[in-house]
Amino acid sequence: METTQLNPKFFACSESRELGEKIAKEYGAKLGLSKKTVFSDGEFQVSYEETIRGRRIFIIGSTMPNSDNLMEMLLMLDAAKRASARHITAVIPYFGWARQDRKDKPRVPIAAKLVAKILEDAGATRIITMDLHADQIQGFFEKPVDHLFASTIFLPYINSLNLENITIASPDMGGSKRAYAYSKYLKSEVVICYKQRKKANVISHMQVIGDVKDRNVIIVDDMVDTAGTLTKAADLMMEKGAKSVRAIATHAILSGNAIERIENSKLESLIVTDSIPKKHPSSKIKVVTCATLFAEVMKKVQENTSISNQFLM
């Protein structure tokens, strides 16, 4: 049998192990044996506890802060390269540091570009990720990037709600392209929120561009961090006469007082994926898994077949 025809092996970084097990199960496989050893000063070492020589391997791990998650992915990639794996695919459901995709003021880094470079230098021969904060991040890589859209998960969910008079909303100008893509598929109206910030994570002013009166509004975004923008937008739309406001966000960072804000807001529900491992102590938050989507794409990568039918928009 040709080496390239051998079944791939699956491994997961420690914080993404639960998602890794789901993806492997959906694929019809099991996670391989790996180990993480932590030293008393916080330094850690990873190791593969089975041979991976000549094999295609998938390493599953979101790189959300803190930086240990990114570092663990880098060490897993380097170990795989030095163990003579043939193809090393970094499966990164949530690509951290993506908000730093450009120089928005003098003397700051472009962290997303830096992360892309060190992932490749560490040994990644392919990247599979989902809903990057900015599409142009794909261009930061010299290796192939499969950029998946969570719309393939969320759109069937929206249809299952059987809502009438749907309006898709973007919480800011930067997400307008995503909102229009959803609205085109759902044949719905679109509104945009215009906001101004005093500083990062602090909104000084927001207004809604468009009419939401008597509409069932669904806010779409790639991530929800402090939930300040999201909850402010939801409350504002209800004040403008919306019938209901729901939200979908691919990556549930939910830092600081995010849960409290969501609970106290006019949001009816927030639907997120499990790209970031986190407990959600809120009855308003519903989690839909991205495991099936990733497993299907990984199977097509292994079989060298097209993944274009995985995109609804």
Image (cartoon, grey):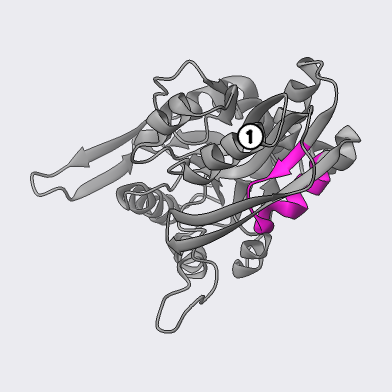
Q: Which residues are magenta?
A: 168-182
Residue at image coords 44%, 30%: 32
Task: Note whether 98 is above or below 153 in the view shown.
Answer: below
Residue 239 falls in image quadrant: top right
Q: Where is the C terminus found, in terms of image quarters? A: top right
Q: Is residue 72 above or below residue 173?
A: above
- Rendered residue at 57%/27% (across/down): 267
Q: Main secondary structure of the magenta part?
A: helix
Image quadrant for the N terminus?
A: top right
Residue 259 vs residue 5, the one in the foreground: 259
Please say if 30 is above or below 34: above
Residue lying farthest left?
A: 40
Is residue 58 visible to the viewer in this orientation of the structure?
no
Q: Is residue 169 visible?
A: yes
Examine the rendered structure and indicate whether residue 25 appears above or below residue 170: above
Residue holding disc 1: 239
On the image, the x and y values in percent for residue 298 come to 66, 37
How far across and how far down the image is residue 211, in percent?
Answer: 80, 41
Q: Secondary structure at mark 1?
A: helix
Residue 79: x %, y % from top left: 37, 51
Label tally: 1
Q: Amino acid at mark 1?
A: Glu
Viewer-closest of 186 and 293: 186
Q: Residue at x 44, y 84 (%)?
A: 106
Q: Residue furthest bottom?
A: 106
Q: Position of residue 244 (x, y in %)?
A: 69, 24
The reply, left or right, for residue 143 in relation to residue 279 is right
- Mark 1 crowd level (few <14, some 14–19, many ≥20, 10 Å Cα): few
Residue 72, magenta (yes or no): no
Q: Nearer the viewer, residue 30 or 102?
A: 102
